[in-house]
């Protein structure tokens, strides 16, 4: 597609429920990134994919967080047993190739997750 | 891990004034990027810097990659109301390994421009 698409744009969930956040990267972009942005804070790295594999998942906060990518396209970030501290905007970005000079990220508009 | 310190945290200026913000790092980065985020949107790339000492302009924006590779600044000249938003610096290390593709972001500078 023309840009990075994320869905849903907003999600309100009850504490303890599981949520799935979806990211559709720009067509042809092999690298995909997930970041978390708490209110008034900077962007916190979670995980990135090169193709369908995740070379760096060091930012995932706990084992309740997982992500997968299939077909070198769509990625899903899953949060199990959500907690109130999981409330944040989850941003996805893609780029032509991870780490290559000259390839900046293009971000989606994010999913605003609120755990009540 | 790598951390970026961005300052100031917020700025309130009059339309027409110039703005300067900067980022410093405890470690070396090989690429510095500056992003702007509008409310409800993802960050948008403004300027990318790839070489120590590099000075790059994009319209009213000017950014520099510090000689030590541990800092960068962004200047905005003759500010206008649509410059309002949050500005983030970001750095990337070319050290290789599994972290090669990761950007580290600063905490952001909130810019308010009064007409």
Image (cartoon, rainbow, N blue to C red):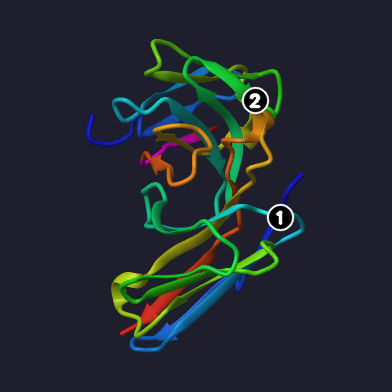
Disc number placed over residue A57 in the picture, else none: 2
Of the pair A77 and B61, the residue shown nearer to us: B61
In this rendering, the answer to whether B73 lies above or below B17 is above
The reply to whether the magenta stretch includes residue B97 is: no
Residue B68, horizontal then vertical, whole percent:
70, 66
In this rendering, the answer to whether A15 lies above or below B96 is above
- Tag 2 secondary structure: loop
Q: Residues at marks 1 and 2, common chain?
A: no
Parent chain of label 1: B
Q: Which residue is mark 1?
A: B28
- Magenta segment's dominant SS is strand
Q: Is residue A3 shown to the viewer in this render? A: yes
Badge 1 vs badge 2, beta-carbon distance below 8 Å = no
Residue at left offset 38%, top offset 18%: A74
Image quadrant holding the C terminus of chain A, namely top right
Of the pair A52 and A34, the residue shown nearer to us: A52
Near mark 2 (Cα within 10 A), the count class, few <14, some 14-19 or many ≥20, is some
Q: Nearer the viewer, mark 1 or mark 2?
A: 1
- Tag 1 secondary structure: loop
Residue at left offset 47%, top offset 81%: B19
Q: Which range of residues does the magenta coloring cover? A: A109-113
Dividing the picture into quarters, in which one does residue A12 lie? top left
Image quadrant holding the N terminus of chain A, namely top left
Disc number placed over residue B77 in the picture, else none: none
Instruction: Compute the Cα span from label 1 to label 2.
Output: 22 Å
Residue B81, horizontal then vertical, whole percent:
30, 76
**Left or right: where A15 falls relative to B47:** right
The reply to whether the magenta stretch includes residue A111 is: yes
Residue A21, horizontal then vertical, whole percent:
44, 24
Residue A113, horizontal then vertical, whole percent:
48, 34
């Amino acid at each position: 597609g023309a840009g990075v698409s994320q869905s849903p744009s907003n999600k309100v969930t009850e504490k303890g429920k599981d949520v799935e956040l979806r990211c559709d990267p720009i067509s042809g972009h092999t690298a995909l990134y997930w970041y978390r942005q708490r209110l008034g804070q900077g962007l916190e790295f979670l995980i990135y994919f090169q193709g369908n594999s995740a070379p760096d998942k060091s930012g995932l906060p706990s084992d309740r967080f997982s992500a997968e990518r299939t077909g070198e396209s769509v990625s899903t970030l899953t949060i199990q047993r959500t907690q109130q501290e999981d409330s944040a905007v989850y941003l996805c970005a893609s780029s032509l190739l991870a780490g290559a000079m000259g390839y900046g990220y293009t971000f989606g508009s994010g999913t605003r997750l609120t755990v009540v | 891990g790598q951390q970026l310190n961005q300052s100031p945290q917020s700025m309130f200026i009059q339309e027409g004034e110039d703005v300067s913000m900067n980022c410093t790092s405890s470690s070396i980065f090989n690429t510095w990027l500056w992003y702007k985020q509008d409310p409800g949107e993802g960050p948008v790339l403004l300027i990318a810097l790839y070489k120590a000492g590099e000075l790059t302009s994009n319209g009213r924006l000017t950014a520099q990659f510090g000689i030590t590779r541990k800092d960068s600044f962004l200047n905005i000249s003759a500010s206008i109301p649509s410059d309002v938003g949050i500005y983030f610096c970001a750095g990337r290390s070319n050290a290789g390994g599994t972290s090669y593709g990761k950007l580290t972001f600063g905490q952001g500078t909130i810019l308010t421009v009064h007409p």
